[in-house]
Amino acid sequence: MPTVLMFASAREAAGRARDVIDGRTLGEVLDEASRRYGDGFVRVLANSRVWLNGEAPDDEPHRTPCTARDEIAVLPPISGG
């Protein structure tokens, strides 16, 4: 199962920094994460970048395949001065 790494406000919304979530595609994994963590996570995810194995995916999430060895990072926008 792919490992999902959550940073900053995504980590806060999920209540954890990482999880292992089953899914055959990136979209399935993100859908399951949204179900697990609820509306706060969904709001953060809507404004986040999602990377697969350190790279931005080229395809639509529901067409991007995932394997057990994959690492998915949810990277919310970072503000600061």
Image (tube, helix red, strand yellow):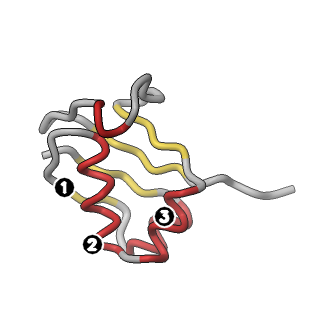
Give the image location of residue 24, x and y in percent.
Answer: 15, 40
Residue located 19% across and 55% down the image: 20
> With respect to residue 7, does 61 lie above or below?
above
- Which one is closest to the eye, mark 2 or mark 3? 2
Helix, strand, or loop for circle 1?
A: loop
Q: In which quarter of the image is the C terminus?
A: bottom right
Q: Position of residue 35 (x, y in %)?
A: 29, 70
Count residues near mark 3 (Cα–Cα under 10 Å), then give few for <14, some for 14-19, many for 20+.
many
Q: Is residue 28 left or right of residue 47?
A: left
Q: Which amino acid does label 1 sit on?
A: Ile
Kindly indicate the quadrant of the structure image that contains residue 39: bottom left
Q: What element carries label 2?
A: helix
- Residue 53 position, x and y percent, is 34, 30
Labels 2 & 1 near each other (Cβ < 8 A) = yes
N-terminal of the two: label 3 or label 1?
A: 3
Q: Is residue 50 left or right of residue 38?
A: right
Q: Name the residue under label 3.
A: 10
Q: Earlier in the sequence, mark 2 or mark 1?
A: 1
Q: Which amino acid does label 3 sit on?
A: Ala
Judging depth in this view, the residue of 17 and 4 nearest the camera is: 4
- Say which element carries label 3: helix
Separation of marks 2 and 3 at Cα, in angstroms = 13 Å
Which amino acid type corresponds to the residue marked 2 in the rendered image? Arg
Q: 32 or 14: nearer the eye?
A: 32
Image vertical order of residue 6 relative to residue 51, above or below: below
Q: Where is residue 55 in the image (x, y as percent from the top left)?
A: 45, 27
Residue at which label 1 appears: 21
Question: In which image quadrant can residue 61 be found?
Answer: top left
| Residue name at image x 54 percent, y 57 percent | 46
Cα gap from disc 3 to disc 1, whole angstroms = 15 Å
Residue at numbered disc 2: 36
